[in-house]
Image (cartoon, rainbow, N blue to C red):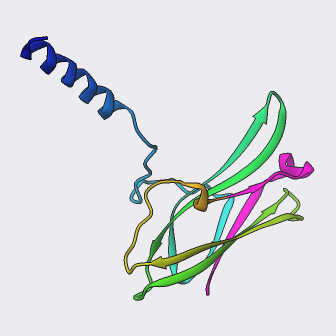
Amino acid sequence: MDLKKLVIIALIFLLIGIFSGCQKREATDVNTIPENIEFESDLLELTYANIVFHRDGDVVLRTEVQYLFKNIAKRVLNITVIAEFYDKNDKLLFTGGPKFLEYLPIDYVETEVFPPNTITYTGIDAKDVDHVKIIVTEV
């Protein structure tokens, strides 16, 4: 194989790499937090949040809340996160968590949604979730 073919193959792989990859959420995105998500914390800023309904046809199998934080405290944090799932009548359906996040450095900003940034409700009423409250406390 000559050098020209190797360069072309390398460029193809480079282009594939550029156009694929993880879903990255920028903390500066506008309008990324829906109105049906409440947030309680004086330590962190919610930079992204979303409620996702996982379906099999018309049946909701589970409901998931995803979130990303920015440490706005002036110190390193160890925190717990819980999520309360409510229906349209403000009836508490499920409390999920706690999720533990340790050693969040000062000014740290999360940019990608991973399993530690999600809380899932798989109960029979998962289809009835209308809004979610994310609550952060320091450990």
* Screen quadrant of the C terminus: bottom right
Q: Residue at x 39, y 58 (%)?
A: 28
Q: From what the image shows, is residue 43 above or below residue 19?
A: below
Q: Is residue 82 magenta?
A: no
Is 68 positioned to the left or the right of 9 in the image?
Answer: right
On the picture, is 92 further left or further right than 4?
A: right
**Left or right position of 29 against 121:** left
Residue 84: image quadrant is bottom right
Q: Furthest residue to the left?
A: 3
Q: Which residue corresponds to the image point at 92% horizontal and 49% vertical from the top-left?
A: 124
Q: Position of residue 87 (x, y in %)?
A: 85, 57
The answer to if 122 sits in the magenta stretch is yes
Percent x, y of residue 130: 78, 54
The outermost residue toward the right is 124
Q: Residue at x 27, y 25 (%)?
A: 13
The part of the image, by quadrant, that contains residue 73 is: bottom left
- Image location (x, y in percent) of residue 31: 50, 53
Quarter the N terminus occupies? top left
Query: Is 23 drawn above or below residue 74 in the view shown?
Result: above
57 over 97 or under it: above or below: above
Along the line of sight, the residue nearer the viewer: 93 or 24: 24
Magenta-highlighted residues: 119-139
Q: Is residue 82 left or right of residue 14?
A: right
Q: Residue at x 47, y 79 (%)?
A: 103
Number of numbered discs on residues: 0
